[in-house]
Amino acid sequence: MRRRALAAVLIALASALFFTATYVLNRAIATSGGHWAWSATLRYFLTLPMLACVLPWRGGFGDVWRALRAHPRVWLAWSGIGFTLFCVCLTWAAAYAPAWLVAGTFQLTVIAGMLLAPLIYDDARARLPRGALALGVVIVAGVAAMQLGHFHGTLDRDAWLALASVTVSAFLYPLGNRKILLHLERTGESLNATQRVFGMTLASQPFWIVVALYAGGVAGVPPWTQVALAAGVALFAGTIATILFFHATAMVQDDASALGAVEAMQAAEILFSTLLGVALLGEAAPRGIALGGALIVALGIAGLGVLVGRRSAGDGRATKTLRTDRGA
């Protein structure tokens, strides 16, 4: 059992590394002059065929088609919010802040998931857990310290807009994903994580076509370097990281401590984004107040992961929601 738990933790750590591609590669595109709209669009255009290649071994297409045909409006609405609007906001912010700062600020999504719960559920899940909220306050304080430290206590208009954009994306992602999960729960339709992500990716395509038309109008055809980097985001974050994380949670879903450790590994995203941003993009590493804030966020995420993981152990419904609040 210990070997299985250790394997799950290592897999979750690997998923955190792959999820980091979202922040680092988006920043690489932004600093090289690539337009944010193409970055967001290409990610989901390219994620769709990648997931399609995996899906035959992860539950198949049949159940997904039936779910989409039965309730197309639900899938369109919440996929547009949870995938399209979320990614547009997150990608736009990459033009104004380093990868580690975007990654750290996006961890507000763990607070967003809790605050949205009373608006989404009408059962015990609507209650706000005091322990989790306390850790949430710690995370918010850490994010504030990161922002103030990086911008030396003074945020200009672009900095405020970037901060607001990442914060909005942190709420949109869990909102869209939780609403789809709740819809599946109420209809009795059974889709695994990969099928659900594929369904939402497919349902969001009409919106991505609109964004692509806008991108083409203002920026022309994207350069091949941007296409290649966006393909990296689609492969590493959109496909590999998602599959690895859900596999890790499935391995230990009945083991409270192991599940908490798996969930806590997301804190490594801040570390990985910092190391890769410095090594690959030449970004300045966080120092002083910003570094302290990053450490506070990482510790808060790790503590919250352990707390939430223990509460979710043995509860399949709760386990399904883990990454929906925290992945990018």
Image: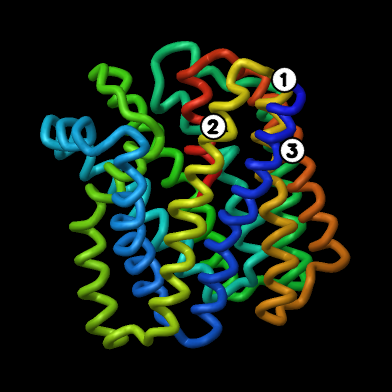
Tag 3 residue: 302
Residue 304 visible in the displayed image: no
**Tag 3, which secondary structure?**
helix
Residue 220 circle label: none
> Residue 282: percent from the left, percent from the top?
71, 81
Q: Earlier in the sequence, mark 3 or mark 2?
A: 3
Quarter holding residue 64: top left
Q: Say what amino acid the circle numbered 1 marks.
A: Met
Q: Earlier in the sequence, mark 2 or mark 1?
A: 1
* 75 and 132: which is toward the camera: 75
Is 206 left, or right, of 238 in this rendering? left
Residue 147 visible in the displayed image: yes
Is residue 242 positioned above or below 151 on the image? above
Give me the residue at 79% from left, 42% from top. Answer: 299
Disc 2 versus disc 1: nearer the observer: 1
Is 26 left, or right, of 267 in this rendering? left
Q: CA distance from mark 2 to mark 1?
A: 22 Å
> Residue 279: percent from the left, percent from the top?
73, 76
Q: Say what amino acid the circle numbered 3 marks.
A: Ala
**Tag 2, which secondary structure?**
loop
> Residue 291: percent from the left, percent from the top?
82, 61
**Tag 1, which secondary structure?**
loop
Give me the residue at 69% from left, 27% from top. Answer: 4
Tag 2 residue: 322
* Quarter occupied by the N terminus: top right
Q: Say what amino acid the circle numbered 2 marks.
A: Leu
> Residue 58: percent from the left, percent from the top?
36, 36
Quarter holding residue 275: bottom right
Is 88 left, or right, of 264 in this rendering? left
Tag 1 residue: 1
